[in-house]
Image (cartoon, helix red, strand yellow):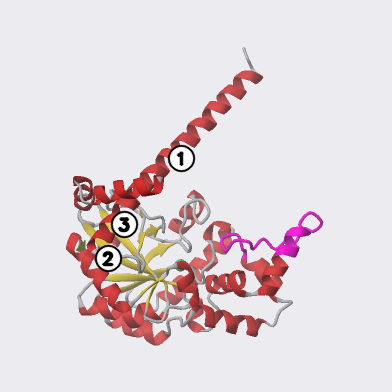
Amino acid sequence: MIGMLLSSVETRLANSYLFDYIVNNSFCVFLYHDVTDNASRFCEAHKLSVPTAQFAEQVQIIGRYFKFITPKDVFQRSVPLQSALITFDDGLAGCFENGLHILDQRNTPSIVFMNMEPLDGPVFWSGMVDYLLQEDELFQKASIESRQHSSQTTSTMNCDSILDCHPAQLDHYLQRRDREDVFAKAREYYGPFATREHLAEAEKSKFSFIGNHLFNHFNAAILSDSQLTDAYLQNNQALSTYRNHLNMFSYPFGQPDSCYNKRTHRTLRSLGAEILFSALPAINFTRNDVFYYRIAMNDAITSDEDFRYLLIDSFLRFRYRILKNRFIWAKKEASNFISGRSKHPY
Ligand SMILES: [Zn+2]
Protein backbone atom coordinates (compact mmCIF):
# COMPACT_ATOMS: atom_id res chain seq x y z
CA MET A 1 0.00 0.00 0.00
CA ILE A 2 2.76 2.44 1.06
CA GLY A 3 4.78 1.31 -1.97
CA MET A 4 1.86 2.11 -4.29
CA LEU A 5 1.35 5.50 -2.64
CA LEU A 6 5.03 6.38 -2.97
CA SER A 7 5.08 5.23 -6.55
CA SER A 8 2.09 7.47 -7.35
CA VAL A 9 3.78 10.44 -5.60
CA GLU A 10 7.00 9.80 -7.53
CA THR A 11 5.10 9.64 -10.82
CA ARG A 12 3.52 13.03 -10.07
CA LEU A 13 6.90 14.47 -9.10
CA ALA A 14 8.42 13.12 -12.32
CA ASN A 15 6.18 15.58 -14.17
CA SER A 16 6.67 18.48 -11.81
CA TYR A 17 8.89 21.53 -11.32
CA LEU A 18 11.08 19.33 -9.12
CA PHE A 19 12.10 17.27 -12.13
CA ASP A 20 12.90 20.44 -14.10
CA TYR A 21 14.88 21.78 -11.14
CA ILE A 22 16.91 18.55 -10.94
CA VAL A 23 17.70 18.55 -14.64
CA ASN A 24 18.58 22.26 -14.79
CA ASN A 25 20.89 22.20 -11.78
CA SER A 26 22.70 18.89 -11.91
CA PHE A 27 25.46 16.84 -13.43
CA CYS A 28 24.14 13.28 -13.87
CA VAL A 29 26.49 10.36 -14.39
CA PHE A 30 24.97 7.18 -15.83
CA LEU A 31 26.39 3.72 -15.21
CA TYR A 32 26.24 0.80 -17.64
CA HIS A 33 27.92 -2.61 -17.68
CA ASP A 34 27.08 -4.74 -20.71
CA VAL A 35 25.23 -3.84 -23.89
CA THR A 36 24.15 -7.01 -25.66
CA ASP A 37 21.21 -9.02 -26.96
CA ASN A 38 22.70 -12.17 -25.40
CA ALA A 39 23.02 -11.31 -21.71
CA SER A 40 25.09 -13.71 -19.58
CA ARG A 41 23.55 -15.39 -16.52
CA PHE A 42 25.71 -13.09 -14.38
CA CYS A 43 24.34 -9.94 -16.06
CA GLU A 44 20.77 -11.28 -16.01
CA ALA A 45 21.00 -12.04 -12.28
CA HIS A 46 22.10 -8.49 -11.43
CA LYS A 47 20.37 -6.51 -14.19
CA LEU A 48 23.74 -5.45 -15.61
CA SER A 49 22.84 -5.67 -19.26
CA VAL A 50 20.82 -3.54 -21.67
CA PRO A 51 19.83 -4.81 -25.16
CA THR A 52 21.57 -2.98 -28.01
CA ALA A 53 18.55 -1.19 -29.54
CA GLN A 54 17.31 -0.20 -26.10
CA PHE A 55 20.70 1.24 -25.22
CA ALA A 56 20.51 3.46 -28.32
CA GLU A 57 17.04 4.64 -27.24
CA GLN A 58 18.21 5.34 -23.69
CA VAL A 59 21.09 7.47 -24.96
CA GLN A 60 18.59 9.40 -27.06
CA ILE A 61 16.33 9.92 -24.01
CA ILE A 62 19.22 11.15 -21.82
CA GLY A 63 20.25 13.51 -24.63
CA ARG A 64 16.77 15.08 -24.66
CA TYR A 65 17.30 16.40 -21.12
CA PHE A 66 21.08 16.80 -20.76
CA LYS A 67 24.09 17.93 -22.72
CA PHE A 68 26.65 15.10 -22.98
CA ILE A 69 30.12 16.08 -21.83
CA THR A 70 33.41 14.23 -22.19
CA PRO A 71 35.32 12.58 -19.31
CA LYS A 72 38.04 15.14 -20.05
CA ASP A 73 35.64 17.93 -18.97
CA VAL A 74 35.21 16.12 -15.65
CA PHE A 75 38.95 15.52 -15.35
CA GLN A 76 39.67 19.20 -16.04
CA ARG A 77 36.92 20.37 -13.61
CA SER A 78 34.97 21.99 -16.38
CA VAL A 79 31.50 20.54 -15.85
CA PRO A 80 28.54 22.70 -16.98
CA LEU A 81 25.05 22.62 -15.48
CA GLN A 82 22.49 20.26 -17.01
CA SER A 83 25.18 17.89 -18.23
CA ALA A 84 25.52 14.10 -18.36
CA LEU A 85 28.32 11.59 -18.66
CA ILE A 86 27.99 7.98 -19.84
CA THR A 87 30.19 5.46 -18.00
CA PHE A 88 30.69 1.70 -18.18
CA ASP A 89 32.22 -0.53 -15.51
CA ASP A 90 34.28 -3.75 -15.72
CA GLY A 91 35.03 -4.14 -19.47
CA LEU A 92 32.61 -6.76 -20.76
CA ALA A 93 32.85 -7.44 -24.51
CA GLY A 94 29.35 -6.13 -25.35
CA CYS A 95 30.22 -2.71 -23.96
CA PHE A 96 32.92 -2.36 -26.65
CA GLU A 97 31.22 -4.24 -29.50
CA ASN A 98 27.79 -2.64 -29.15
CA GLY A 99 27.82 0.20 -26.60
CA LEU A 100 30.87 2.14 -27.82
CA HIS A 101 29.92 1.47 -31.43
CA ILE A 102 26.53 3.20 -30.93
CA LEU A 103 28.07 6.08 -28.97
CA ASP A 104 30.67 6.60 -31.70
CA GLN A 105 27.96 6.83 -34.36
CA ARG A 106 26.25 9.54 -32.28
CA ASN A 107 29.45 11.42 -31.40
CA THR A 108 28.70 10.77 -27.72
CA PRO A 109 31.66 10.52 -25.32
CA SER A 110 32.03 7.91 -22.58
CA ILE A 111 34.53 6.25 -20.27
CA VAL A 112 34.98 2.53 -19.54
CA PHE A 113 36.37 1.76 -16.08
CA MET A 114 38.41 -1.37 -16.74
CA ASN A 115 39.61 -4.35 -14.77
CA MET A 116 42.70 -5.09 -16.87
CA GLU A 117 43.69 -8.47 -15.40
CA PRO A 118 40.85 -10.50 -16.99
CA LEU A 119 41.72 -8.94 -20.36
CA ASP A 120 44.84 -11.11 -20.61
CA GLY A 121 43.33 -14.40 -19.47
CA PRO A 122 42.92 -14.54 -15.67
CA VAL A 123 39.39 -15.03 -14.41
CA PHE A 124 37.15 -11.98 -13.70
CA TRP A 125 36.94 -11.91 -9.89
CA SER A 126 33.35 -10.77 -9.23
CA GLY A 127 32.01 -12.98 -12.04
CA MET A 128 33.74 -16.00 -10.50
CA VAL A 129 32.68 -15.32 -6.90
CA ASP A 130 29.11 -14.73 -8.03
CA TYR A 131 29.20 -18.00 -10.00
CA LEU A 132 30.39 -19.86 -6.88
CA LEU A 133 27.75 -18.24 -4.68
CA GLN A 134 24.88 -18.77 -7.11
CA GLU A 135 25.61 -22.05 -8.87
CA ASP A 136 28.45 -24.09 -7.33
CA GLU A 137 27.05 -26.59 -4.82
CA LEU A 138 30.45 -27.60 -3.42
CA PHE A 139 31.24 -23.98 -2.64
CA GLN A 140 27.84 -23.40 -1.04
CA LYS A 141 28.35 -26.53 1.11
CA ALA A 142 31.87 -25.44 2.13
CA SER A 143 30.54 -22.01 3.05
CA ILE A 144 27.84 -23.52 5.32
CA GLU A 145 30.36 -25.89 6.96
CA SER A 146 32.76 -23.04 7.52
CA ARG A 147 30.00 -21.06 9.27
CA GLN A 148 29.06 -24.03 11.46
CA HIS A 149 32.66 -24.53 12.60
CA SER A 150 33.51 -20.85 12.86
CA SER A 151 33.81 -20.99 16.65
CA GLN A 152 36.44 -23.77 16.50
CA THR A 153 38.66 -22.47 13.74
CA THR A 154 40.43 -19.23 12.96
CA SER A 155 40.45 -19.76 9.17
CA THR A 156 36.73 -19.24 8.52
CA MET A 157 35.79 -18.69 4.88
CA ASN A 158 33.74 -15.51 5.13
CA CYS A 159 32.22 -15.62 1.64
CA ASP A 160 28.48 -15.45 2.29
CA SER A 161 28.39 -12.18 0.45
CA ILE A 162 30.49 -11.19 -2.54
CA LEU A 163 31.53 -7.99 -0.72
CA ASP A 164 33.04 -9.84 2.25
CA CYS A 165 34.94 -12.46 0.24
CA HIS A 166 38.67 -11.73 0.45
CA PRO A 167 40.89 -12.89 -2.47
CA ALA A 168 43.21 -14.75 -0.04
CA GLN A 169 40.31 -16.72 1.46
CA LEU A 170 39.07 -17.78 -1.94
CA ASP A 171 42.55 -18.71 -3.06
CA HIS A 172 42.86 -20.95 -0.01
CA TYR A 173 39.53 -22.61 -0.85
CA LEU A 174 40.44 -23.13 -4.52
CA GLN A 175 43.54 -25.11 -3.53
CA ARG A 176 41.11 -27.96 -2.78
CA ARG A 177 39.37 -27.70 -6.17
CA ASP A 178 40.19 -28.22 -9.82
CA ARG A 179 40.87 -24.52 -10.50
CA GLU A 180 40.71 -24.71 -14.28
CA ASP A 181 37.33 -26.44 -14.11
CA VAL A 182 35.95 -23.73 -11.77
CA PHE A 183 37.41 -20.98 -13.95
CA ALA A 184 35.92 -22.45 -17.15
CA LYS A 185 32.45 -22.67 -15.58
CA ALA A 186 32.77 -19.14 -14.18
CA ARG A 187 33.76 -17.76 -17.62
CA GLU A 188 30.73 -19.39 -19.16
CA TYR A 189 28.59 -17.83 -16.38
CA TYR A 190 29.78 -14.22 -16.76
CA GLY A 191 30.21 -14.22 -20.56
CA PRO A 192 32.86 -12.75 -22.87
CA PHE A 193 35.26 -10.14 -21.51
CA ALA A 194 36.88 -7.42 -23.64
CA THR A 195 40.12 -8.13 -25.51
CA ARG A 196 43.22 -6.10 -26.40
CA GLU A 197 41.70 -5.69 -29.90
CA HIS A 198 38.62 -4.04 -28.39
CA LEU A 199 40.83 -1.59 -26.49
CA ALA A 200 42.97 -0.83 -29.55
CA GLU A 201 39.80 -0.09 -31.53
CA ALA A 202 38.41 2.16 -28.77
CA GLU A 203 41.73 4.01 -28.62
CA LYS A 204 41.20 5.19 -32.21
CA SER A 205 37.91 6.92 -31.32
CA LYS A 206 37.98 10.49 -30.04
CA PHE A 207 34.86 9.74 -27.97
CA SER A 208 36.09 6.71 -25.97
CA PHE A 209 38.18 6.91 -22.80
CA ILE A 210 39.32 4.32 -20.26
CA GLY A 211 39.76 4.58 -16.48
CA ASN A 212 40.67 2.45 -13.47
CA HIS A 213 38.39 -0.10 -11.72
CA LEU A 214 41.29 -1.98 -9.96
CA PHE A 215 43.39 -4.69 -11.64
CA ASN A 216 40.66 -7.19 -10.83
CA HIS A 217 37.23 -6.59 -9.31
CA PHE A 218 38.17 -6.70 -5.60
CA ASN A 219 36.24 -4.79 -2.94
CA ALA A 220 38.54 -1.84 -2.11
CA ALA A 221 37.16 -1.50 1.43
CA ILE A 222 38.32 -4.96 2.56
CA LEU A 223 41.82 -4.64 1.09
CA SER A 224 44.72 -3.33 3.18
CA ASP A 225 46.32 -0.07 2.05
CA SER A 226 49.18 -1.92 0.38
CA GLN A 227 46.85 -4.41 -1.37
CA LEU A 228 44.70 -1.53 -2.63
CA THR A 229 47.81 0.32 -3.79
CA ASP A 230 49.03 -2.73 -5.74
CA ALA A 231 45.61 -3.35 -7.31
CA TYR A 232 45.36 0.30 -8.39
CA LEU A 233 48.93 0.73 -9.68
CA GLN A 234 49.05 -2.59 -11.55
CA ASN A 235 45.88 -1.57 -13.34
CA ASN A 236 47.17 1.92 -14.05
CA GLN A 237 50.35 0.50 -15.55
CA ALA A 238 48.30 -1.64 -17.95
CA LEU A 239 45.95 1.25 -18.77
CA SER A 240 48.63 3.87 -19.31
CA THR A 241 49.86 2.18 -22.50
CA TYR A 242 46.67 3.51 -24.13
CA ARG A 243 46.43 7.13 -25.27
CA ASN A 244 42.79 7.47 -24.16
CA HIS A 245 43.55 6.63 -20.51
CA LEU A 246 42.47 9.18 -17.87
CA ASN A 247 43.51 8.91 -14.23
CA MET A 248 39.94 8.51 -12.99
CA PHE A 249 38.61 5.70 -10.81
CA SER A 250 35.31 3.94 -10.21
CA TYR A 251 34.92 1.79 -7.10
CA PRO A 252 34.19 -1.91 -7.75
CA PHE A 253 30.68 -2.67 -6.34
CA GLY A 254 30.58 1.05 -5.48
CA GLN A 255 28.44 1.18 -2.32
CA PRO A 256 29.23 3.56 0.58
CA ASP A 257 30.86 2.10 3.72
CA SER A 258 30.85 -1.52 2.51
CA CYS A 259 32.93 -0.69 -0.61
CA TYR A 260 34.56 2.68 0.08
CA ASN A 261 35.32 5.05 2.93
CA LYS A 262 37.59 7.97 3.85
CA ARG A 263 40.63 5.66 4.05
CA THR A 264 40.15 4.27 0.51
CA HIS A 265 39.50 7.81 -0.84
CA ARG A 266 42.74 9.03 0.78
CA THR A 267 44.80 6.11 -0.54
CA LEU A 268 43.49 6.37 -4.09
CA ARG A 269 43.83 10.15 -4.26
CA SER A 270 47.41 9.86 -3.00
CA LEU A 271 48.09 7.44 -5.87
CA GLY A 272 46.96 10.02 -8.42
CA ALA A 273 43.28 9.22 -8.93
CA GLU A 274 41.92 12.65 -9.85
CA ILE A 275 38.22 11.77 -9.78
CA LEU A 276 36.41 8.98 -7.87
CA PHE A 277 33.01 7.52 -8.82
CA SER A 278 30.52 5.73 -6.59
CA ALA A 279 27.73 3.40 -7.74
CA LEU A 280 25.22 4.83 -5.27
CA PRO A 281 22.35 6.17 -7.38
CA ALA A 282 22.14 9.90 -6.72
CA ILE A 283 22.00 13.22 -8.54
CA ASN A 284 25.17 15.36 -8.37
CA PHE A 285 24.41 18.97 -7.54
CA THR A 286 28.08 19.76 -7.05
CA ARG A 287 30.25 20.24 -10.10
CA ASN A 288 34.00 20.39 -10.52
CA ASP A 289 34.30 18.02 -7.60
CA VAL A 290 36.55 14.98 -7.03
CA PHE A 291 33.75 12.53 -6.17
CA TYR A 292 30.51 11.77 -8.03
CA TYR A 293 27.52 9.45 -7.66
CA ARG A 294 26.20 7.47 -10.61
CA ILE A 295 22.76 6.26 -11.62
CA ALA A 296 22.71 2.67 -12.90
CA MET A 297 20.70 2.15 -16.09
CA ASN A 298 18.98 -1.14 -16.82
CA ASP A 299 16.56 -2.75 -19.27
CA ALA A 300 13.52 -1.49 -17.33
CA ILE A 301 14.06 2.04 -18.72
CA THR A 302 12.12 2.04 -21.99
CA SER A 303 10.53 5.50 -22.15
CA ASP A 304 10.87 9.16 -21.14
CA GLU A 305 8.42 8.49 -18.33
CA ASP A 306 10.61 5.64 -16.94
CA PHE A 307 13.64 7.92 -17.14
CA ARG A 308 11.95 10.82 -15.35
CA TYR A 309 10.76 8.41 -12.66
CA LEU A 310 14.30 7.00 -12.27
CA LEU A 311 15.74 10.46 -11.67
CA ILE A 312 13.07 11.40 -9.11
CA ASP A 313 13.49 8.03 -7.38
CA SER A 314 17.28 8.50 -7.18
CA PHE A 315 16.81 12.02 -5.82
CA LEU A 316 14.27 11.00 -3.13
CA ARG A 317 16.13 7.88 -1.99
CA PHE A 318 19.33 9.84 -1.54
CA ARG A 319 17.54 12.57 0.48
CA TYR A 320 15.97 9.83 2.63
CA ARG A 321 19.39 8.26 3.16
CA ILE A 322 20.85 11.59 4.37
CA LEU A 323 17.93 12.09 6.76
CA LYS A 324 18.24 8.53 8.10
CA ASN A 325 22.00 8.91 8.66
CA ARG A 326 21.45 12.21 10.49
CA PHE A 327 18.83 10.57 12.69
CA ILE A 328 21.16 7.62 13.50
CA TRP A 329 23.99 10.07 14.29
CA ALA A 330 21.74 12.19 16.54
CA LYS A 331 20.45 9.07 18.34
CA LYS A 332 24.03 7.89 18.95
CA GLU A 333 25.09 11.33 20.22
CA ALA A 334 22.06 11.46 22.54
CA SER A 335 22.76 7.99 23.90
CA ASN A 336 26.45 8.90 24.48
CA PHE A 337 25.36 12.04 26.27
CA ILE A 338 22.88 10.17 28.49
CA SER A 339 25.27 7.31 29.31
CA GLY A 340 28.02 9.89 29.93
CA ARG A 341 25.80 11.74 32.36
CA SER A 342 24.76 8.55 34.13
CA LYS A 343 28.42 7.56 34.66
CA HIS A 344 29.48 11.03 35.77
CA PRO A 345 26.36 12.73 37.14
CA TYR A 346 28.29 15.71 38.55
ZN1 LIG B 1 32.36 -3.25 -11.50
Question: Mark 3 is on which residue type?
Answer: Leu
Numbered disc total: 3
Q: Considering the image in quadrants, where does the C terminus appear?
A: top right
Q: Residue at x 61, y 72 (%)?
A: 132
Question: Which element carries disc 3, helix, strand or loop?
Answer: helix
Local secondary structure at mark 1: helix
Q: Which of marks 3 and 2 is nearer the N terminus?
A: 2
Label 2 vs 1, first from the N-terminus: 2
SS at mark 2 in the image: helix
Q: Mark 2 belongs to which amino acid?
A: Lys
Q: How far apart are marks 2 and 1 (CA)?
A: 33 Å
Q: Earlier in the sequence, mark 3 or mark 1?
A: 3
Q: Report which residue position mark 2 lands on.
A: 72
The furthest residue to the front = 1
Q: Which residue of the protein is positioned furthest toward the top in this rendering? A: 346
Q: Decide whether residue 337 is among the magenta residues.
A: no
- The residues colored magenta run 144-166
Badge 1: few (under 14), some or many (20 or more) residues near its Cα, within 10 Å? few
Q: Mark 3 points at which residue?
A: 310
Numbered disc in front, either 2 or 1? 1
**Residue on which disc 1 sits:** 325
Left or right of 223: which side holds 52?
left
Can residue 284 be seen?
no
